[in-house]
Image (cartoon, grey):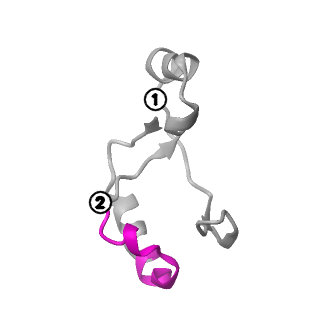
Amino acid sequence: MYIEPFDTKEFIRLKQLFDQELDEYRLENTRNRIYKPHITLCTNDNINQNTYDLAHNIFHSFIGEIKYIWVYNQNMELIKEYELK
């Protein structure tokens, strides 16, 4: 379950920059995957009724700002931290 923004143009542009700079770290099976900007709330492994209710009944839209992006490898080891200005 995830939250997806309405306006994705800047996210797509940012993803293209990351793809250029971090291509050597990308997993081969993810290179052709379609990118949808989102924030993950939970994975399929831990979804439950409370999470579903929160996302569908309690969550309200908001305006936010991204300050940091952390890039991890498949072993969840931090590769790089970016501070956005």
Q: Nearer the viewer, residue 8 or 75?
A: 75
Q: Nearer the viewer, residue 62 or 5?
A: 5
Q: Where's residue 6, x and y in %?
A: 33, 42
Do the numbered discs 2 and 1 sit on residues whose CB atoms are within 8 Å?
Answer: no
The quarter of the rendered structure image containing the C terminus is bottom right
Q: Which residues are magenta?
A: 18-33
Does residue 31 appear left or right of residue 40 in this picture? left
Q: Secondary structure at mark 1?
A: loop
- In the image, is residue 60 part of the stretch drawn in magenta? no
| 84 up-or-down from 61: above or below | below
Q: Quadrant of residue 73?
A: bottom right
Q: Where's residue 56, x and y in %?
A: 44, 19
Q: Identify the residue position indicated by label 1 in the image.
A: 61
Write the residue at 40% across / 52% down. 37
Does residue 69 appear left or right of residue 57 in this picture? right
Q: Where's residue 83, x and y in %?
A: 64, 67
